Amino acid sequence: MRTLAVALAVLLAATVVRAQPPASGPSGPADLMPLPVEVVWQSGRLPLDAKMTAATAGPADSRVTEAWNRALTRLQALGVRPASARPADVRRATIVLRWQNAGLPVQAVGEDESYTLTVTPRQATIDAPTPLGIIRGLETFLQLARSDGGALHVPAVVIQDRPRFPWRGLLIDAARHWQPLEVIRRTLDGMSSVKMNVLHWHLTEDQGFRVESKRYPKLHEMGSDGKYYTQDQVKDVIAYARDRGIRVMPEFDMPGHTTAWLVGHPELGSGPGPFQIVRTWGIFDDALDPTREDVYTFLDGFLGEMAGLFPDAYMHIGGDEVNGRSWNQNPRIQDFMYRHQLRDNHDLQASFNKRLYEIVTRHGKRVVGWDEVLHPDLPTNIMVESWRGPEALGQAARLGYDGILANGYYLDLNLSTASHYLPDPLPAGSDLPEEARRHILGGEACMWSEMVTPETIDSRIWPRAAAVAERLWSAASVRDVDDMHRRLETESQRLEAFGLSHRSGYVPMLQRLVGDAPVEPLKTLADLVEPVKHYARGQVREYRSDTPLDRLVDAARPESETARLFRRQVDFYLKNGPDAAQAGDLRAALTRWRDNHAALEPILDRSPPAAEARVHSRDLAAVSRRGLEALDHLASGRSAPAAWVQDAEKDLAIARKPSATELELAVLPAVRKLVLAAAQLDQLAAQGAAAWNAKIEEQLTLPR
């Protein structure tokens, strides 16, 4: 465990941005994330040193005090040691926090989070309508801090900022794979850094019931394997989140995904039982019985207890993926459907949701559910979370339902950061009328936990969730993927310093695979592979909740930054036709990767846990060799011979084949672009560079 002092030093080292030479006037940092609405750079800078003082002005709110204490701790770790900790006079203080209104007792959707940050050579002020704006503004202020010759300062600037959407969430599935409190806390720290404001806590599943119920203790005692949050722990998380401007919304998924409920209370089920905690993944038959009054009596008691535990105004009831088999096989349920003229299971579930809506509403909460809860019989003050996409979300909004988008933000699919950054709850060109647009409240990144453990979850959430956070905070026009990646690198360092392990956990996992052997050759390979996408891992082998997740595929990052940057280099190299001045870096990288197999193979021979990497190590060597040959052909000024192109494509096809490792070689598309360019070099002059590159890109995206 790192000491607090070391962690804080790392945090502030990551927070400082290296000063850039000004082109004309002061130059601003390039790494604010999310990007504010308006940034106007001014002349000069504000020193942060031992003379630094602070003042506050506004109605009493402990969240402002806590936010400033956290900021001060981070500044102190950089060596800024104020001579006095006492509040200063507003007129003479270095930093002034000024808010107009007291915060609501329970943070609400749409509560004002705007702020104005003004930095002059004499003073920094954060002005906000509410304490939430102060919390958001302080994060921006800390992102501005930079070191110049060892002295800390903030450049003079005026920032006007406010969120585009009021709902900017992150779903943590703690039910499939248990996530202990330290994971939740450090996740909240990361969320606050990027101005996310909703923790969607998925607490019940077929694989686990993760919250203590004092009224129905069999739920957690028999449905959790002993891994659940006590009510005191839940209260601590809610308080921790509130201090960071984050709401906590619980999800109790029903009527499907409820096997863990039925272990302790089989009388609630549609099937005969007995029931056991599910150890595998998928959609299962077990479901609550929607036809019995005692089920609703039970749910009234349980949800009433949870409504008292979770102060947020919203409660998520799930409502997704009910296959209906247990209903179809129960004669009594079928008779109920006939007598009540319910046409199908969708109507039956709608009748269940209607009763559930009445219960949740009676306990003072608003119902949230996945797309499947939509039904003409249900009132429009239910909120829809759409996994189906913006079109389905828009249809719900047209009907008058509030909604948030989850589709496009599923972090467990191991997709690229850009694929999560570009989807928008309100896509450009949407024909939604203004009235319907007001019902689109935002979105949530989703971390479903079938394939993550407490050791690996950070690497699946961060830093990609920061890109989703920017999509939901910043203007719709902020869509420059390259600029996002540039800023994301610095934000990733900040996040790591909060105690998140998406960077620091990588090499130790690789080292375990090779034991005492040097880890660098394996890291060179691991830097260039990615887990297979979507749900492909489960198609290769059966996974269970007790399956160890400690292989190379678990250590590998969802997106290879090395491969992404190499692809950019290839694009620049070919942009105006092969550029000899840029070929050297490409050649150096490909040479290093080609030769890595010779260094890695003897390590794999004596490291059984890492041995499965051999196939990718061989493929990387072969692919890199073809890349080097392609560079030779491109340097010659003549198209590569057809026979060479055919052989090279065969080697690349071998490397593309699905593997039992559940990994894919991320550098393949970039090398194939070099091969295609070498094959068609003689067409460059006739087509022109732009058309030539476009044709190659088209060939890259064609099915193979």
Image: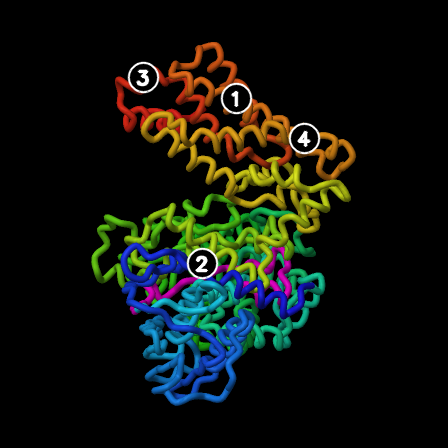
Q: Amino acid at mark 4?
A: Arg
Left or right: 602, with 158 as reference point: right
Q: Nearer the viewer, mark 2 or mark 3?
A: 2
**Residue 466 figure quarter:** bottom left
Q: Which residue is mark 1?
A: 626
Q: Are marks 3 and 1 in contact (CB under 8 Å)?
A: no
**Do the numbered discs 4 and 3 sit on residues whose CB atoms are within 8 Å?**
no
The crowding category of the residue bearing disc 4, from other C-alpha atoms within 10 Å (few below 14, some 14 to 19, many at least 20), is: some
Task: Tell me the quarter of the image containing the N terminus.
Answer: bottom right
Up-down relation of residue 359 to residue 22 (above or below): below
From this viewpoint, is residue 654 visible? Answer: yes
Q: Earlier in the sequence, mark 4 or mark 1?
A: 4
Q: Amino acid at mark 2?
A: Arg
Q: Quickly name the residue at label 2.
A: 18
- Give the image location of residue 555, x and y in percent: 63, 46
Q: Which amino acid does the dot numbered 3 rest on?
A: Gln
Place of residue 204 in the rendered image (x, y in percent of width and height, measured from the top left): 58, 61
Q: Position of residue 522 (x, y in %)?
A: 66, 38
Secondary structure of the residue carrying tag 3 is helix
- Which residue, given by chain and number where applicable, does mark 4 sit on? 614
Measure how far apart labels 1 and 2 are at the Cα level: 39 Å
Tag in front: 1 or 2? 2
Find out whether residue 98 is within the magenta segment: no
The quarter of the picture where residue 590 lies is top right
Q: Is residue 103 left or right of residue 464?
A: left
Question: For the residues carrying marks 4 and 1, which lies nearer the camera in this image?
Answer: 1
Residue 683 marker: 3
Q: Nearer the viewer, residue 547 or 336?
A: 547
